[in-house]
Image: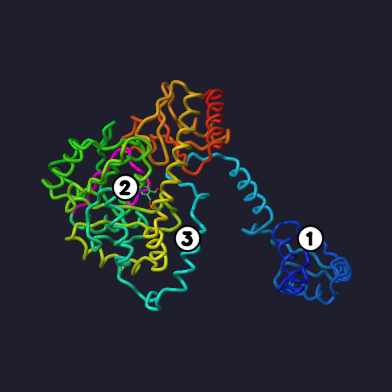
Amino acid sequence: MWFQIDRSNDKTLTQQVYEQLRQFILNGDMKKDEKLPSTRELASSLGVSRNIVLEVYDQLVAEGYLIVRPRAGTFVAPGSLFQTSGSKESLQKEEFIHNKNQDIIDFRAATPAMDHFPRKTWGRLAKDICFDVPDMIFGYQSSDGLPELKEEISRYILRSRGVVCQPHQIMITSGATQALSLITEILMRDNQNVAVEDPVTDEMRTIFSYRGAHLCPIPVDDKGIQPEFLSEESPPGFVFVLPSHQFPMGVTLTIQRRIQLIEYARRCNSYIVEDDYDSEFTYEGTPVHSVQGLDPERVIYVGTFSKILSPALRIGYIVLPTGLVDEFKKLKWYTDRHHPSLEQLILTRFIREGYLDRHIRKMKRIYKQRREALVNSLKRHFPGCTILGHAAGMHLVAEFPNVSFTQQIIDWVCKHGVKIYSAEQYSLLKGSHENKIVLGYGSLSVEVIEEGVRRIKEAMVSFSG
Ligand SMILES: Cc1ncc(COP(=O)(O)O)c(C=O)c1O
């Protein structure tokens, strides 16, 4: 038994000895019927008074962990073995998994570079704001968000994404996740059908189905969603699209199809929900403007700061057609009152003082380098593979001739220290994307990306399933 006694600890010595001895018994480090050292022996080896050990033994006898056999000594009672969550074995197991995971290169998509969060600026603004804001900021505010932030966002999305709106049409939400959850709740009241691109992001799709939506998959080709597959007989309450950079396929919706979509929504009294999650990062050509700019009364635009800054901020927003604003404000109020005000003020200054534009410029350079490293490594190790989609965002899709990315091969690659994701897992109608994988590069350095692709190659060469 190895006790750790710390006299500077806030816990009393009795507490320390009691907790550790109890843990030895629960863990099985002291087995049933094992005899404990005498109180004098243990006290002297721990350098504590005998009274402390006596007190601990009495307590453990009273609780049933120990039994006293007259003239024989004190023993561990039967039935005291129990793996608590903090037990040594489970801690060792957790540590093992942690260490193992540290070495795994995870090409998970939609993960930004967390090592580049502008900590200094954000921290300074947070401190200034906390000291400087008037007292009323610490009270309840309007459910749609602070006017100064909505003003900054309206200017930012007009110049960067061509989104046309007045600040009062904007609602600040807890990420795109809450935005889509509120949209689903309101638009599904009259119509349970939701049309989604196929393949589609599993997380967003789950938000709809969790609320009871009937999903209508609409196929995506190299020009984006194909509007001719939308039903004229039973149109959906809304069509969910990622027109700037489809997830996962990475394609950009053509202008002809954007117009077709809007005409469909007008004809069928439906809405288009546009999720514009990572379009700030475009590495070739000029970024295409939003669909919302074509018809602000038919398109509900969803934006997020999760990719440009950090998912931890939980700040997103919805740009609503004017007729829907009041309904959304009510629902948001009954959901969580409003988004945290201090965070909103920090972001307001971050945008107003030019830090956001600077951060985006810097991250664009970094992501471009990471993307190039991934493309070059793939071409070097797999000359037959094709990179699909537009050079944008933080992930790409690689198509391999004559390979089917079954769970078996994905598990095999994982055994070689790399996590990859098959495009097929995002499909609703199965069978079209088995030879493609989705590789996220946002949070991986150039060296890690190169090592990751090398490991994929090593795994695939040795795969014999
Ligand atoms: C398509 C898509 N949109 C938006 C988001 C961002 O969600 P949130 O703003 O809630 O972090 C994600 C997250 O992975 C996503 O995959």
In the rendered image, the residue lying farthest to the left is: 267
| Picture mark count | 3
Residue, x 85% and y 74% (percent of image)?
A: 50
* Residue labelled 1 has its Cβ within 8 Å of some atom of ligand 1: no
Q: CB atoms at circles 2 and 3 under 8 Å apart?
A: no
Q: Is residue 178 above or below residue 98?
A: below
| Residue type, numbered disc 3 | Trp
Using a 10 Å C-alpha cutoff, classify the residue at mark 1 as few (fewer than 14 neighbours), some (14 to 19) or many (20 or more): few
Marks 2 and 3, how far apart at CA: 24 Å
Q: For the residue labelled by badge 1, is the local secondary structure a helix, a strand or a loop? A: loop
Q: Position of residue 463 (x, y in %)?
A: 54, 25
Q: Is residue 166 magenta?
A: no
How does the figure colour the protein chain or chains? rainbow
Q: Is residue 202 magenta?
A: yes
Q: Nearer the viewer, residue 125 or 379?
A: 125
State the image quarter where residue 137 is shown: bottom left
Point out the image quarter for the N terminus.
Answer: bottom right
Q: For the residue labelled by badge 3, is the local secondary structure a helix, a strand or a loop? A: helix
Which segment is the magenta one? 191-207
Q: Which mark is residue 122?
A: 3
Using a 10 Å C-alpha cutoff, classify the residue at mark 2 as few (fewer than 14 neighbours), some (14 to 19) or many (20 or more): many
Q: Is residue 320 above or below residue 135?
A: above
Q: Position of residue 393 (x, y in %)?
A: 39, 41
Q: For the residue labelled by badge 2, is the local secondary structure a helix, a strand or a loop? A: loop
Q: Nearer the viewer, residue 445 or 456?
A: 445
Residue, x 79% and y 63% (percent of image)?
A: 3
Q: Which mark sits nearer the N-terminus, 2 or 3?
A: 3
Q: Nearer the viewer, residue 6 or 176?
A: 176
State the image quarter where residue 285 is shown: top left
